[in-house]
Amino acid sequence: MKTSYDSDVIAWAQEQVNLLRSGQFSLLDIEHIAEEIEDVGKSEQRELASRMAVLLAHLLKSISQILSMVKRTDYVSRFLPGLKKEIGVRTNAVKLRKKSPSPAGEGRGEENKYRKKLYLTPSS
């Protein structure tokens, strides 16, 4: 039974497999088999190119994110000393407030000094 390549490729392929396995090489459709092998190679090349494009896109995105983090880190490191000082001042003000929660209590003058420095109260 000879199945046409043009009418039913799946049946044709199965027939070619059976002919190969049975050793009936003279009955093989060599021209179409060669085309199919070439197409498989082209398909594999397209798949590889597609996957490489996706990989490249992911790498570029990762590089962009890393550069963005480096820029932010550089920005933070330049302003970190001032930020640490401000955090320290705020921490001291909170500690003083805990020591002396009442307006008439001890240490209130120190807290007001910190508040003025942080612009929390109008300066006198």
Image: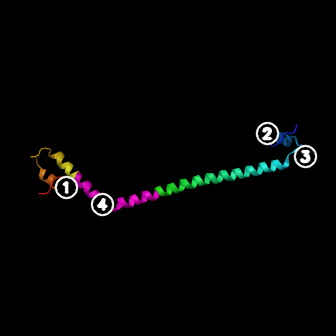
Label 1 is placed on what type of residue? Tyr
**Dot placed on the residue nearer the N-terminal end, 3 or 1:** 3
**Which element type, helix, strand or loop, lies under badge 2?**
loop
Q: Which mark is residue 35?
A: none
**Which element type, helix, strand or loop, lies under badge 3?**
helix
Determine which residue is flagged by label 3: 26
Q: Is residue 19 left or right of residue 10?
A: right
Q: Which mark is residue 119?
A: 1
Determine which residue is flagged by label 4: 81
Q: Residue at x 15, y 44 (%)?
A: 101
Which residues lie in the magenta part? 66-90
Label 2 is placed on what type of residue? Asp
Distance between the alpha carbons at the discs numbered 1 and 2: 84 Å
Determine which residue is flagged by label 2: 8
Q: Is residue 86 left or right of residue 36?
A: left
**Dot placed on the residue nearer the N-terminal end, 3 or 4:** 3
